[in-house]
Amino acid sequence: MTNKPLSSEEITELTVGLNRLARNLWWTWDQGAQEIFQELSPRGWQNLYHNAVAILHELSDYELRVRLQDPGLAAKVRTVLRAFDAYMQEKDTWSSRNHPQKKGHPIAYFSAEFGFHETLPIAAGGLGMLAGDHTKSASDLGLGFVGISLFYREGYFQQAIDANNWQTEYYTQLNPKNLPMEPVLNARGEPLVCSVEIGVTQVTFQAWRVNVGRVSVYLLDMNRPENEQHFRDLTLRVYGGDSTTRIMQEVLLGIGGVRLLRQLGLQPCVFHMNEGHAAFLTLELVREKLASGKSYQDALNATRQECIFTTHTPVEAGHDRFSPELMEYAMHRFRSQLPIPFTELMKLGRVNPASETEPFCMTVLALKLSRAANAVSELHGQVSRQMWQCLYPGKTVEQVPIGHITNGIHLQGWMKGTVRRFWHARLSGEGARHAGRISGSDWEKAINTPEFWASVEDPAFISDEELWALRYRLRRELIEFARRRLLIQRQRLTQGDFIAFDALLDPDALTIGFARRFATYKRAPLIFQQMENIVRLTREKARPVQFVFAGKAHPRDDEGKRFIQHIIHLSKYSDLQGHLVFLENYDVHVARQMVSGCDVWLNTPRRPLEASGTSGMKAGCHGCLNFSILDGWWREGYDGTNGFAIGEDSHSESIDEQDRIDSANLFKTLTEQVVPLFFMRDADGIPRQWIHRIRRAMSTLVPQFTTDRMVREYAEKYYHTK
Ligand SMILES: *Cc1c(COP(=O)(O)O)cnc(C)c1O
């Protein structure tokens, strides 16, 4: 190491590199890159909520250059930039080896929401997180892939709890200049402007590019000066407004999305609709084909060859349906461009094409105009085939052409820094030998392999003591995070429900977490149906149990808000005080703290409505065990040794009965298995059997439930075109 100061050119190269790095979300799943932004401004890292672009804006160019004269920092930056460039330029990818694609013919993936990172809050829940993780893995695997969504300049709402413990929503304006995105420009360097017909109006839109590793995601934005205000506000909020807003957003997403791709010169080989919101893209593809002279039947068939569809929920309200009048209104100008009567198009969204009153269903449209469709877990596949059998007269339920690919998560993106460093050290040191051919620099690849996670079952690779120390560290980090958050939450409320924050939550207690959207079918308060029993558990001096909850209810879901109110009320005024906390404003960052810090991840959906669920998949690599109804992914993941099941692989048709049975089973498993196993310690104070379960969870679940595996399945089963 020489301590020679860097030349001015070298420093310029590093500052340019850092600016490029901050504008590619790759940095969010690279530990070294994160540490650089944190080191550049530890306060900014906290106050600007981990926003790399904003941190670079806050530092003056002069300060940055001076800081880079520190040879230690400069060396770190150089190492990270080298890794970034190597990633961006890699030629030998999974895709190039297995499914080479022609340039200019990517997979186009349409989703109304994408969750990438806490600085770009344009996801409402699991659907968006999945879309973000799908994109990150598409990049890792080297797929030709583009994403399409909308730029919601107020994003999804921020949650605050008022003095009545009622959820209130507020919105903050996102500033594109401070976000990891850049305007899409035309050849003259001006914003590229496209247009789409909505109602009777020709409306314009622009687009922003988000760089996700090697992949681009384009966010469509109607906030253009030439548009009327109500159109400018169409891209204000995720799922904002009423069904008129909704249908117009979906026209922009589907039809506008295809138009943008064409302007960019892209001819996707596959259009992948992530949920029905994007299904209008099929109508634009049909329009293009009619305009080129194809017959209506040929246009439909050709469109079908290009499209695939993933359905994400058996919940009725999750399937958009628009009245014929609303369709007529929203499509008024678009349909005048078609050489066929509009009544023909309406048939594409109806179960019974002959009906004139049946609403237009986006899922029906997507199913009718795709060459393949899939659900997101095996059970969800069964349920979906039943649900849509009506569209395939003459076919038995088993013959309904809806398959399934079980969801996953982008492993590196979800791993907490503490754990990334932990596994990285394993892979580059002693462990490397153990795990076979894996060298330290290849850990990104190794971390996704079953071989690596299988080696975690071996105590010679990693000891009980090391795993248990990691668990303590992660639990402690969560407790400190929760105390900080609660201090801020309660300071906002003027009335003094004072509590001592350093007495809140116990670092030795079995910590049970629950966080997700507060949709009623997810039954967040189910565990508190047995209130007295639960209170008793938290009071056991030698074997204390505690709970951390978080989640947002949809702004118009009063039932969900009542669930939140009930749980917060318990946390403040019941005997659970100090043993139950509710963290406000659930988002990606809160999610990561919770899935890593909790010992147990609780999930109590009303089966079979969960479809897949993904938050439990984020727990595994951190050594947090799942404790869940056998719905969605857990029904496939649970093997009797790698976590805990609530009830059996079946459910009652009666909702009341189901709630009663599930609540009883939950308590039974909790008291007979979870709590005893966690507190069964040997002479060294180590819960050997619990740790054995952690090892089993890591080896059987982690490599299986990743988007790395999931996207490979999509590529093999559905993206493959002859
Ligand atoms: C993972 C995740 C979800 C999905 O959680 P489920 O338990 O699958 O519903 C929702 N929101 C955020 C912020 C997440 O990180």
Image: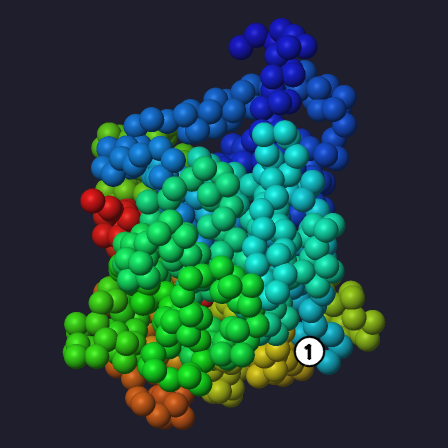
The residue depicted at 33 percent of the width and 61 percent of the height is 296
Is residue 55 shown above or below 613?
above
The residue depicted at 55 percent of the width and 23 percent of the height is 76
User: Residue 62 or 583: which is nearer the viewer?
Assistant: 62
Instruction: Examine the rendering and report whether any part of residue 434 can be seen.
Output: no
Residue lying at the far right of the rendered structure: 494
Instruction: Examine the rendering and report whether any part of residue 255 can be seen.
Output: yes
Q: Position of residue 380 (x, y in %)?
A: 30, 71
Quick check: 3 left or right of 133?
right
The residue depicted at 30 percent of the width and 28 percent of the height is 92
Q: Residues within 10 Å of mark 1 (few under 14, many from 20)?
A: some
Number of marks in picture: 1
The residue depicted at 47 percent of the width and 44 percent of the height is 261
Residue that mark 1 sits on: 166
Amino acid type indicated by mark 1? Trp
Quick check: 150 left or right of 635?
right
Q: Position of residue 513 (x, y in %)?
A: 49, 67
Q: Position of residue 101 (x, y in %)?
A: 30, 36
User: Residue 389 or 259: which is nearer the viewer?
Assistant: 259
